[in-house]
Amino acid sequence: MDGIGAWKQARGPRGYLALGSAMMLVYLAVVLEMGLLVKALAVAYLALVLLRIVINPGRGFRFGPDSVHWFARRGAGAAPISAIRRVSIGRDIDGRTVCVMSLSDGRDVPLSGVEEVDPARLMREFGRRGVPIMGGTLGT
């Protein structure tokens, strides 16, 4: 999956691989009776990985091969690219990027996690997939 908003997700394969690695390091440091510094570093790494997973904002979106998957506080969803009638991309009055997908079933889905993304990049990514794009300044 191509991730424009994916970097916001700590609860993915890489995050859980890091968690498993950190747990293994702590286990080995204790079982092999390594020095206090090694144990402290292993525990610190485990704490950082756990912290990242716990405070995961759980928002953003990813492009799949033929779909868009989004994650928000209200839950997750997905839509095939063919079901996207158009996407509106622009900046709100505070200067943050806003992206709203209009789906063929009549729903308008705001994509969260795009506030810091360059609108031109979003336009290119949706354009590459053949989605009609409307750009400009959007209201809040």
Image (cartoon, rainbow, N blue to C red):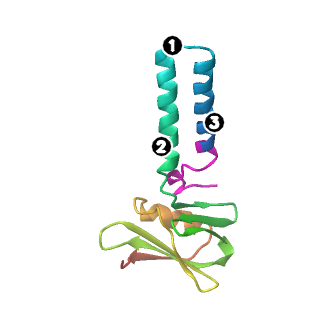
Of pointers 3 and 1, the one earlier in the residue sequence: 3
- Main secondary-structure element of the magenta-colored stretch: loop
Q: Which mark is residue 82?
A: none
In this picture, which residue range is highlighted in magenta?
1-15
CA gap, disc 2 and disc 3: 14 Å
x, y (%) of residue 107?
A: 57, 83
- The amino acid on which the numbered mark 2 sits, given as a three-letter code, is Leu
In magenta segment, residue 10: yes
The amino acid type of the residue labelled 3 equals Gly
Residue in view at x 56 percent, y 55 percent: 3
**Dot 3: element:** helix
Disc number for residue 51:
2
Circle nearer the N terminus (1, 2): 1
- Residue 127 to residue 4: above or below: below
Snapshot quadrant of residue 105: bottom right
Residue drawn 68% across the image and 75% down it: 82
Q: Which mark is residue 35?
A: 1
Examine the rendered structure and indicate whether residue 130 appears above or below residue 52. below
Q: Is residue 99 above or below residue 21?
A: below
Q: Residues within 10 Å of mark 2 (few under 14, many from 20)?
A: few
